[in-house]
Image (cartoon, rainbow, N blue to C red):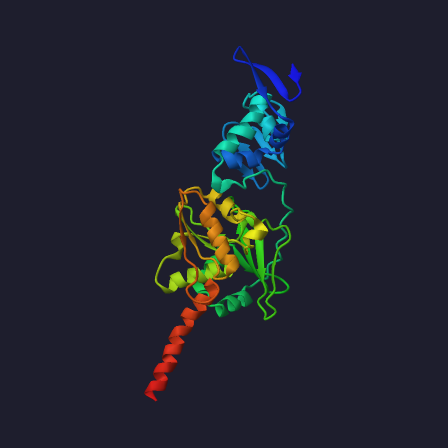
Amino acid sequence: MKAAGFFIFARQGVSSISYVSKEQIERAKQWDLVTYLQCYDPAELVRCSRNVYTTRTHDSLKISNGKWFWWSKGIGGRSALDYLIKVRGMSFPDAVLHMDGELTERKPAAYSSCEPYKAAARLELPEQYPTSDRVIAYLNKRGIHREVIEYCLETGCLYESRPYHNAVFVGHDQYGTPRYAAIRGTTPTRYIGEAPGSDKRYSFSIPILDSKELHLFESAIDLLSFCTMQQIAGKDWRKYHHLSLAGIHSSKQQGRQLPVALTQYLKMYPQINRIALHLDQDEPGRQAAQTIQALIPSSFSVADEPPKFGKDVNDELLWQLERPIQRSRQTDGISR
């Protein structure tokens, strides 16, 4: 029997009443199965191919294009709600309350933006040029160490595009699939853009699977500049996670929330417990650092480490590289 907004059902032989509003039902129906499992039961989700997933418990259950089908049982559905009812055996009201109530209460603050989303447009990566000579020359001028550049080229997160010879910084998801690309011009015109279909949640990064420490930057150039400074100092920069936010907005523009790239990264690498912020020495950068420190859960250790010289990390790197030259000139002047 169903009354307005109420569902009356029996569970384990006991009659009980649960109130489920239309709004709760609509919210529950919005969750696709992949998103639900990624957020709340990631160990259950197994990738089969580029766009197909299965579950660890039922390997004949396939998920693709927002739908799922359990082949051994001959049943399927379109949403996580269908899955909870048909596969896990929940009643409709229990499933709705489970998703809208219990999960909301258990949702970690760091993942507050983990919500159902519409599939992003297909990423259209620029065509790759046969060599990367111009990109290497451009990054060398920005002070980036050759070893850092070679690492990015070899791991597929950096290449030179055709026909404009732009530097393309590629962001991947946890399965190694390209999901984002920042584009930087290598000529004096200073072109800055993103590839069509880029998903900012998967911004340019250098992940290290067994590390618990993450270093955060506004741009890919700043990220590589920090790695270079570590290289110069004789430190192993490949011991830590590095993530670019693909730019930031003022807190007034984005509201009081964590950057989507940071939120997604912490979901992909839940072992991280320390974050170092290397955001710009300007008003938006300082506001973003304050917002992150205010909203990140207390389980994380957060250190604010802005550049000591200049506006951003690349400015600091160039300043460091210039100092030996200046000292040499001063010494030459004295000797003469």
In x, y percent, where is residue 301? 39, 47
Above or below for 329 versus 153: below
> In which image quadrant can residue 329 be found?
bottom left
Of residues 199 and 98, the one drawn nearer to the viewer in this rendering: 98
Can you name the residue that lies furthest to the bottom here? 336
Above or below for 253 versus 55: below
Can you name the residue that lies furthest to the left here? 335
- State the residue at coordinates (61%, 29%): 24
Residue 40 lies left or right of residue 189; in this view the side is left
- State the residue at coordinates (55%, 34%): 36
Above or below for 86 versus 52: above
In x, y percent, where is residue 231? 39, 62
Q: From where the camera sits, is residue 53 visible?
A: no
Residue 319 lies left or right of residue 120; in this view the side is left
In x, y percent, where is residue 249? 56, 54
> In which image quadrant can residue 161 be found?
bottom right
Where's the C terminus, which quadrant?
bottom left
Can you name the residue that lies furthest to the right here? 4
Can you name the residue that lies furthest to the top here? 13
In x, y percent, where is residue 335? 32, 87
